[in-house]
Image (spheres, rainbow, N blue to C red):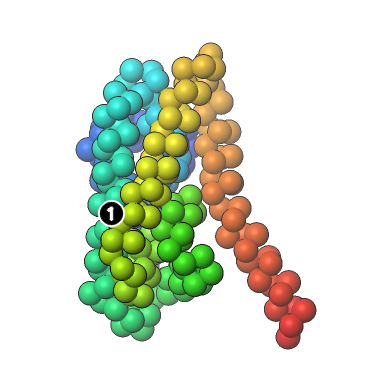
Amino acid sequence: MDIFSGDNLINLIKAVGLLGVFGIIFAETGLLIGFFLPGDSLLFTAGFLASQGIFNIIVLIVITFIGAVVGDSVGYTFGKKIGPKIFNRKDSFLFKKENLLKAQSFYEKHGAKTIVLARFIPIVRTFAPIVAGVGEMNYSTFLTYNLIGGGLWTIGICLAGYFLGTLIPNVDKYLLPIILLIIFLSILPPVVEYIKSKRKNTKNP
């Protein structure tokens, strides 16, 4: 089953309810196993369902914001406790070292802003708080960027789904293309970064 498709995602969210949405957002940002979860499309679709009266938009925003912030804090704590040893961990079905290295590279380039920017980049948002913990970023600094990033991500995407659902007649017909566009836009930054890196390596062998 493709959980990213419009109908399946709607059915999933209806089935798990607000508590399930909270759990998915928390897992994607706070647990290593959550990197494959559809955070962006989930938030958008939940916002759309709020426009149809399935959820209260205020409650949805509060729930997802808390899930995102607590999730990142758990990831940070995990990274701080485990430390550099995590980079020696063997690959498994749910853990790929290359994903951790991508987050580390992103963190080295953008510094503390990574905690905000990574919210909008799948996989990186799962591992960025862990890398911040490994690097022993000051927690008050981390928490500030965590709150900002969590707010922009959850509130922004939920409201986008909510207002489109309110303003566009029969928007459910266009839900799948919109979700695919969201997924495309979310994976675009790392693809562009990869192309730039390959070009740079080609010029400087």
Q: Secondary structure at mark 1?
A: helix
Q: From the viewer's perspective, is 92 left or right of 166?
A: left
Query: Residue, x 51% and y 65% (percent of image)?
Result: 110
Q: Is residue 192 above or below residue 68?
A: below
What is the x, y in percent for residue 168?
54, 17
Quadrant location of the N terminus?
top left
In which image quadrant can residue 87 be found?
Answer: bottom left
For label 1, the residue is 71
Taking the spot 52% from the left edge, 37% from the top edge, the residue there is: 179
- Residue 128: name its quadrant: bottom left
Quadrant of image for the C terminus: bottom right
Answer yes or no: is residue 9 visible: no
- Front residue of 167 and 39: 167
Which x, y percent locates residue 47? Answer: 40, 29
Residue 174 placement (x, y as % from top left): 56, 26
- Counting from the top left corner in percent of width and height, residue 37 is at 39, 50
Q: Nearer the viewer, residue 104 or 19?
A: 104
- The answer to whether any part of residue 40 appears in the image is yes
The amino acid pointed to by label 1 is Gly
In the figure, is residue 18 to the left or right of 50? left
